[in-house]
Amino acid sequence: MPDGFIVTFVKAFVLANLVMLLFAFLTWAERRLLGRFQVRLGPNRVGPFGLLQPIADLVKLIRKESIMPEGIHPVLYIAAPAVSLFASLAVFAVIPFGEQATIPGTDWQIFLWISNPSVALLVVFALGSLSFYGFLVGGWSSSSKYSLYGSMRAVSQLISYEVSLALAVIGVVMMAQSLSLTGIAEAQSRDGLWYVVPQFLGFIVYVVASTAEVSRIPFDLPEAEGELVAGYHTEYGGMRFAMFQNAEYVALIAFSAVASILFFGGYEGPWLPGPVWMLIKMAFFILIAMWVRATLPRIRYDKLMSIGWKVLLPAATLNLLVTSAIVAWRA
Amino acid sequence: MAVVDSVKGFGVTFRHLFRKPVTQQYPEYKRPVYPRFRGRHRLHRHPNGLEKCIGCSLCAAACPADCIRVVADENTDEERYSAGERYARIYEINMSRCIFCGYCELACPFDAITLGHDYELAEMSREAMVYTKEMLLEPMHPSRTTPVAPADPFDVVEPPQ
């Protein structure tokens, strides 16, 4: 068994690349699925079923000129997409994909997570909101009014929905008596009940608020192309634009992973190994996000605010109060 | 009831997921064009093989885009190209300027030029967009033909009431 640091490094390397691969596949899957939702075919030219389309896109984006517009702040302009991508990817450091596994051909036992801190959920939310710094800084440093509007929207949206998101999650934390993601997953298999059932209101609030957190339709106002050209990434092109896009998809994958741990029991499940269950549950959430994208139009900005503050926050608070009352009564 | 309507919307999109896509896969499937579609020009011949065009340049005069160039020459008994006294020694159409209005077709007194059905006119250079007489004259090169829809549904004299 090699040294702990090497194991962690290799796990991080493998996981980061798998997430990138998943991102590439997701762009293909989303375009194909949206096509079918709109009675089109979607990309089907590059490779079998268009599966090599992400590679063609990548080659195109890499070959593009890296434009530096006039009047920007060069350091922040370059750093912003990297910050977003890093923050979104870093969430995967604390997401467990299973418990223990033996590497085939050896007797090495490894844990299927990179690290398992007791406050994993806090780390997830801290990093999740960190990626908005990239959006804010990117929009601000571009010296463009559309970018600035987009980043301001991104930040006010984050502030409005982060509160409900955290309150929705606290219900789960109280039931599981743990902030650790493995602890929450184990608590659900111990109770024999996925928390989506007792925490249904919290689940709904979480799904809506996390859609706003990853700024997907119907909450994609930071990059509303009808009003703001492309929002905070208006002035970005080539790979820098791709990194913003990448950060958004990786955040979607991360929030799907967290949702499947919090409400659907995570890697716990019968017959199949843990990572398979985890991927099935994540795929469920991602498909829901795509279905939502195919169905709902972008909502108006004042509606966004009033849903956040007048619907989700009271609902999350109600959920929190009822849950805490029940938990206290049981104890 | 905005919430109920939104949920109904999910049902609508879900049903559309199972419909057959309406996409036409273009290079493999070419949708037949309307019978009177105005595409790339053709220069016609008489049944005995002589060209119908006599080089009168009326098409060039009628052309609003000024894309036709005709240089006429005399037919001789040894070298006879057209049925008339003269023939078009040079007949060029600049396809990058042509607006496919069909005025050349209307102006022609001998029905020598008509607009065909082919629309795949992309070329790699501007020079190649100037189509010469050899390219326009029948018979056409077979690789650039376009299917045409049957004329019957469009062949209505009286508009339906």
Image (cartoon, coloured by chain):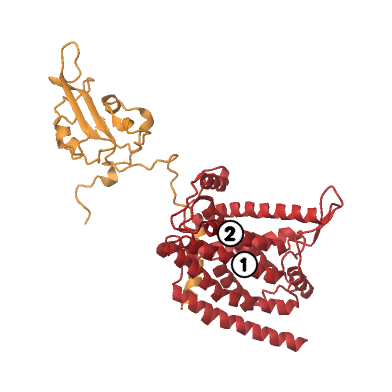
Q: Name the colour assigned to chain A in the rendering.
A: red
Q: Quadrant of the C terminus of chain A?
A: bottom right
Quarter occupied by residue A175: bottom right
Three-letter code, disc 2:
Ala
Q: In the depicted view, which residue is nearer to us: A210 or A3? A: A3
> Mark 1 or mark 2: which comes first in sequence?
1
Three-letter code, disc 1:
Gly
Q: Chain of mark 2?
A: A
Residue A247 disc label: 2
Q: In the depicted view, which residue is nearer to us: A138 or B67? A: A138
Q: Residue furthest top?
A: B78
Q: Work out whether A135 lies above or below A40.
A: below
Quarter occupied by residue B144: top left
Instruction: Please give the name of the residue rendered at 30% of the width and 43% of the height, measured from the top-left corner.
Output: B34
Callout 2 crowding tier (Cα within 10 Å): few <14, some 14–19, many ≥20 = many
- Percent position of residue B141, x then y: 35, 27
Callout 1 crowding tier (Cα within 10 Å): few <14, some 14–19, many ≥20 = many
- Percent position of residue B122, x then y: 36, 36
* Chain identifier of the orange chain: B
- Percent position of residue B9, x then y: 48, 68
Instruction: Please give the name of the residue rendered at 29% of the width and 30% of the height, measured from the top-left corner.
Output: B131
